[in-house]
Every structure is written in C-alpha cells, then in structure tokens.
Amino acid sequence: MKKKYAILFFATFLFQSAFTQELVLKKGKIIDSLVVNDTIPDTFSLYLPTHFTTTKKWPLLLVFDLDGKERQSMSMFLQAAEEEGYLLAAPKLSDTVPLSNNMISASNVLNKISRILPVDKSRVYTAGISSGARFANLVPIFIKDVAGTISAGASIANSDLLNPKRSFHFIGIIGKNDFNYTQMLNVEKVLDRFKFPNQILLYDEEQKWPDVKYFQKAMQLFTLSAMGKKLAAMDSSYIEKAFKKDLAKVNRLKNSNKLLFAEQYMGEMMSIYGVHKNLDSLRQVQKNLRRDRVFKGMKRAENATFFKESLLKEDYQYYIEEDVVTHNFNNLGWWNYQMTEINKFISASNIYEKQMGNRLLGYVNALAEDNIDMVKSEALIDEDALAFLYMLKTILEPENFEHYMNIISLSVKNEDFGTALFYLEEALKKGFDDKEKLYNLPDTGLFRITPKFNELVAKYLKDSRYRINDQ
C-alpha cells in the first residue's frame, strides 16, 4: 500500500555557508514554520498536493492573511489545490508592520520556494480573503513575477496604482450581500478599461466567506488562461469538461429565475473561453436574455437599489466624520433610526432591497471600525470620540458585548459612573453573563465595589462578588 504522505528531500544551497541544508517536506499536509534562511527571520507554511512530483513544474498560489491565521486561510484552498494541481504557500505576515515590510517578506518567501521547488515561474499567483485579499491584490503591482490574484471579499486595494503596461489576471469572489459588492463591480470596469484579464465570481448566500468551490473555480480559470497563452499544456478534455459544467450552471441559474446571475456568468465565460472555442451560440443566448422583459425588470430594480445605496452611503460617511470630530452624542438617536431603516431593508421581501440592507449594515460597521482604528492609532487618543464610536457600535451590533465592556471601562476611567451603569444594565438585559470578564474589566476596580454595580449584577446574574451594606 502506498503511504499517503511520502517524504521528500530537497537540498537548499545556503549562500552564507559552504554546506547544504536538508529540508524534509511531506505531501498532502500543511507544514508550518518553515524558515527562509538563518539570516532572514521570515517564515511560511507550505502545502504540496498528494500527487506532487519533482519531474514537472507546478503553479504556485501564495495565500495571505494579516491576522495570524495563515494556516486557517490556507486550509480553505487545500481541496482546490488538490483538484487543480497547485502548490500552496502562506507567508507569515502581520497588520502591525508597514506594508513595505510585508511585501519584502512575501518576496523573500517566493524566492525561497522558487529555489527549493519546481515552480512554474510564469504561473505564480496570490490569494486572500478580506484584509488578506487587499494585500494579495497589491502583490502583483509590486512583484513583477506574480501573474494574477484571487481576491475574496475585497476589491482592488488602490486602483490608482494599476499600470496598464504591467497587467495581471484579477479574479474577484464576492457575495451580493457583501458591502464591497458595488465597489467590486466598479473595479471590474476599471480593469476592463485597462485591458486587465478579469472575472468576478458571484454568490448570493448570506454567508461571510465563499464556499471552497469558488476557490477551485478561480484556480481553474487561471489554468484555462495559462492554456490560452500557451503557458500550460493544452488539454482539450479539461477545457470541454469545464465548459460543459459552466454551461450547466448557466442553465440552472436561468431555470431558477436568477437571470441577472446567468447573464453575468455568461459574460465571464466568454472572457475565458473565447480563446479556446467558438462562442457564437452562447453569445446569442446572452443577447436574447438581455432582451427578455423579466430580465429588464430585474436589472432596473437592482440599479434602483444601487442608486439608493450610494446616497445612503454618502450620508453615513458624512455624518460619522462629523460626529466623531464634534463628539456629537446627541446624534446617536439619528443613528438608531438609520439602524431601524436598515433592518427594514434586511427584512424586505424584495431581494434587491434585502441585499442592499445587508450591504449597508456591513458598510456602516466597517466605517465605525475604521474610525475606531484611526482614533486609537493617534499618539493622543481622543477618548470622547472613542466613546461615541463604541456607543455607535452597540447600536449597529447590539449583541456584541465587547463594545458595551469598552464603554463601561472608558466611562469609569473618566469617572462617568452614570454612563457605565447604563451600558452595564443594557448588556445584562441583552443576556451578557460573563461574570469573570465583568470583574476583570480594566480601570473599573473602584466601580466594581460600588453598591449599584453589585445590585445590577445580583439582579441579572443572581449573585454578585461583593455585598455592600449601606449604614
């Protein structure tokens, strides 16, 4: 019986010494904490498909995560790497260091892997999710050997940096409920204008991250593109199988009355299969669909929500900037009303309004979080602005108790016990029951031994740690 994980040995020449270092790698398993070399502290994780062999060159996908969860992010691509035949690597990066440092680390890891493994240097790609995606789609701009990027949940980080003379293949994966959806559509227009090869893979499920099948599809698109450019061996059966599967998806979308999806997907199919086969019949199907009365009605409805959404986003951005600068706590009532309106959209029977509501909620949450990060990054923190933003977050995420705890801690620090008691009771009413966390909040030592604090804890959590008898 063949062992599932065969051990491979690679000799890596170290320029700093006169000997070689033996590197032991396993197939079919993520290998963590590999070092670039003794003088460069950068580390990375690596995955070789179970059918890996050194007798041919392999495409490489660099997966990025800036939150210390590179193994978790990498694992989302494992099935796709197995099916499509890609090497995976995930450099260890951090969002606490400058962008340039992370870019150098990514370059060091790429160079290391290219030295020790048979990497097809014309087929090096990047991928990421959310903040990792924003970094991933910057890498081809700064590292010329990168041919494309898979960007899930985020569009191009800065389209002003795009250079028409140094194009790369962009594949976006985005949900229609994601607040980045409309921005992704706008970026697609920029990429088309610059003649960058690109496809956008959409999904309409209300989930934060896409299913792994979208990552496999993205890698397949890279392979189809490489075949079209003669960078990979032409495989007519592979192309035909992929095309038939995509055609079946279009038919399913049409049959389930997802006409906008079907029309968009046909457009992406033509951009990737045009070099491989005659698509006149598919083009005619798309043309007929665009003339369909039901399709036109759906398109008008979606465009109407896009317009309304853009106006509301402008309002949210304007008012949050004003409120943070002026410490306008009186405007929390306006924000509470906006949250009520957003919830109405989310509960609507109209699918386009429902999706718009989810996008607006994500957008205003992202605005608040970005402002919190900006305020906290200042040398002298504006604690009133921070308090306003924490209060806003309790409106936007009423079940996230972390924001209530932040307000309590900050209010007590500034001797505002009334505000602290109010948000304590609000959290307890909504079901907060982590007594240990409550009794270890920073800056609340004196507050925790007051009678009112312990009365509230006893009322909602049945018992308090301290009993104060008023004499």
Image (cartoon, grey):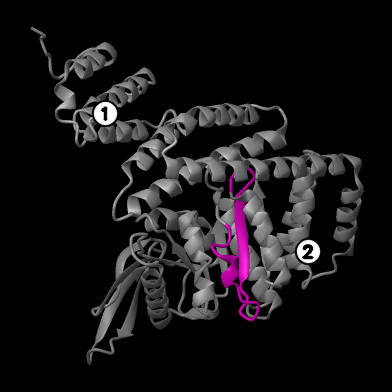
Q: Is residue 15 above or below residue 67?
A: below
> Where residue 6 sits in the image (x, y, percent)?
37, 67
Foreground: 66 or 331? 331
Q: Is residue 238 above or below residue 344?
A: below
Foreground: 393 or 89? 393
Please give the name of the residue rendered at 32% of the width and 83% of the height, measured from the top-left corner.
11
> Where residue 126 sits in the image (x, y, percent)?
51, 67
Q: Which residue is mark 1?
A: 416
Please give the name of the residue rendered at 73% of the width and 55% of the height, measured from the top-left corner.
246
Report crowding for label 1: few under 14, some 14 to 19, many 20 or more residues within 10 A (C-alpha). few
The answer to whether residue 56 of the structure is visible from this angle is: no
Image quadrant for the C terminus? top left
Tell me how far mark 1 sits from mark 2, CA to CA: 62 Å
Q: Is residue 253 magenta?
A: no
Residue type pointed to by label 1 = Asp
Q: Which residue is mark 2?
A: 270
Most distant residue in the bottom direction:
18
Is tag 1's residue or tag 2's residue first in the polypeptide sequence? 2
Count the marks.
2
Q: Quadrant of residue 84?
A: bottom right
Q: Quadrant of residue 431?
A: top left
The answer to whether residue 327 of the structure is visible from this angle is: yes
> Where residue 465 sits in the image (x, y, percent)?
14, 19
Describe the element under mark 2 as helix, strand or loop: helix
Magenta residues, as a range?
A: 155-179
Q: Is residue 169 magenta?
A: yes
> Where residue 179 sits in the image (x, y, percent)?
58, 46
Horizontal side, residue 110 vs residue 232: left or right:
left
